[in-house]
Amino acid sequence: MSESPRATVTVFASPASWIESDAVAQCHQVAALDGMIHVAGMPDLHPGKGAPIGAAMTSRVLYPFLVGSDIGCGIAVFPMRLKRPVPGKLAARFPDLDHPPEPDDPAWSAVSGDIPAGHTEGLGTVGRGNHFAELARVDAVLAADHAERLGLAAGDLVLIVHSGSRGLGERILRDHTEVHGAGPAPDPAAYLARHDEAVRWGSLNRRLMAARIAYALGTEPTAPIVDECHNSVEVRDGGYLHRKGAARGDGRDVLIAGTRGTHSFLVATHAGPEAGHSVAHGAGRKMSRADALRRGKAKHTVEELRRTPVGSLVVCGDRQLLFEEAPTAYKRIEQVVGDLTEHGLATPIATTVPLVTYKTAAAAPRDRGRQRRGR
C-alpha cells in the first residue's frame, strides 16, 4: 500500500513579520496528522493549545480539535447612528454584557425564531479572553468603491462585536474529546450538524449584544454589514477545511481586529486554495498572557491601561484582563494587513479607530478603591 503524500505547509508572512518558531512547528505537527492535505498559516499566526491559531487546515478527515471549543467565534460590524459621540459619556452607558439581558430588554427583538440548539445559557453576553464590543469611528477610507458598497464614509460610527458560542461550543468539543480525544470525528455529519448550530448561535449572540448596546446608547439597532466567524470547519472540494483563528477569505468582507489601542482594518478578500480560502482574523498575540501580565505590571498602572494611546476608553473591571489584553501583547496590525495585501489575499477598504472598548463590566466604586490601595 503506497503512502499518501505528505501535507504541505505555507505561511503567508513576510520576513519582517513576527512569527514564532513554535507556531510554525505546530503547523508542521498538524500537517503530520493522518489525512492532512495542506496547512496555510496567516500573518497573525501564533501558538495555540495543541494547534496553531491563525491557520486554515485542509484534510480528508474532520478533526474537531482543530476548530477548538469556541465554534462560531467571529466579528460582526454594525453601523451606528449617534450624535456627538463623547467617549466618557458613552462608556458609562454601555450595558453589562457579562450577564444576559433582562426578560423585558427591548434587545430581545433581535431574536426571531428558535434559538439554535435551544441553548439559552450565556446568550447576549460577550465572554472573556480576547472578546470585546467596541464603538469605533471610520478613520481612513482606503478603497472608495468598496466603502461605498458597504455604505461607509470617513467619520461614520460602527460597533464591532467579537464573541462566539460561549458554553455551547465548549460542550460540543468536550463531548467529542471525552470519547475520541484529539482524534477525528467518527461521524462527521453528526458533528457538522452541531457545529452549524453553534455557528448560528454565535452570530445570533453578536446581533443580540449589538442591539443591547444600541438601545443603551440611545439609538436603534441595525443589521450587520460584516459578520464572519473565524473558528469553523466546512466541507470544501471533497475535504474538510478547518479554520482556527482565520476568517473566510473567498470574496467576503472581513474586519481584521487590531487592538483596543490601535486601528482595525476592514478588507475585501480574494484568497485562493493555497491560502485555504482564508485571511487573518486579527493582529495575533506576540506575548503569552503570563508574559503580558508580568511585563505590563512593571510598566503600567490599571488607570493608565483604561485610556489607550489613541485616546479611547476601556471598560473593564477585571484588572488582570487589562494587562493580558494590552495593545503591546499583540503584533502590529499594519504588518498583518500588509502581508495579506502583498500576497494578494485582501484589499484594505477602511481603517477604524476605537472610541470605547468594552471587555467586562466596570468595577464597582468600592472595588476601584480597593484596586487603587492594592496597586
Image: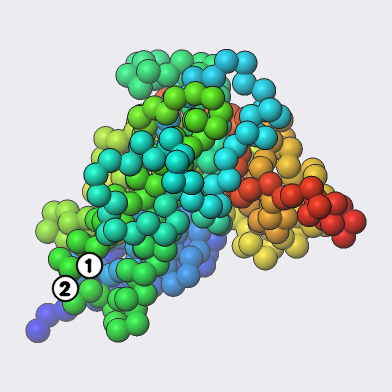
Local packing at callout 1 (Cα closer than 10 Å; few below 14, some 14-19, many 20+) is: some
Q: Residue at x 36, y 69 (%)?
A: 171
- What mark, if any, has residue 191 been given in the picture? 1
Q: Quadrant of the C terminus?
A: bottom right
Label 2–label 1 contact, CB within 8 A: yes
The answer to which of 34 and 74 lies nearer the viewer is: 74
Q: Residue at x 50, y 64 (%)?
A: 47
Mark 2: secondary structure: loop
What kind of residue is marked 2? Asp
Q: Residue at x 55, y 32 (%)?
A: 216
Q: Quadrant of the N terminus?
A: bottom left
Residue located farthest toward the front when viewing the structure as drawn? 104
* Residue 12 shows up from this direction: no
Report which quarter residue 203 is drawn in.
top left
Q: Residue at x 54, y 47 (%)?
A: 97
Q: Tell me if residue 23 comes above or below residue 42 in the rendering.
A: below
- What mark, if any, has residue 187 been given in the picture? 2
Residue located farthest toward the right when viewing the structure as drawn? 373
How many circles with numbers are drawn on the protein? 2
The answer to which of 124 and 6 lies nearer the viewer is: 124
The answer to which of 208 and 140 lies nearer the viewer is: 208
Q: CA distance from mark 2 to mark 1?
A: 7 Å
Local packing at callout 2 (Cα closer than 10 Å; few below 14, some 14-19, many 20+) is: few
Residue 208 appears at what percent x and percent y? 41, 41
Left or right for 217, reference 49:
right
Mark 1: secondary structure: helix
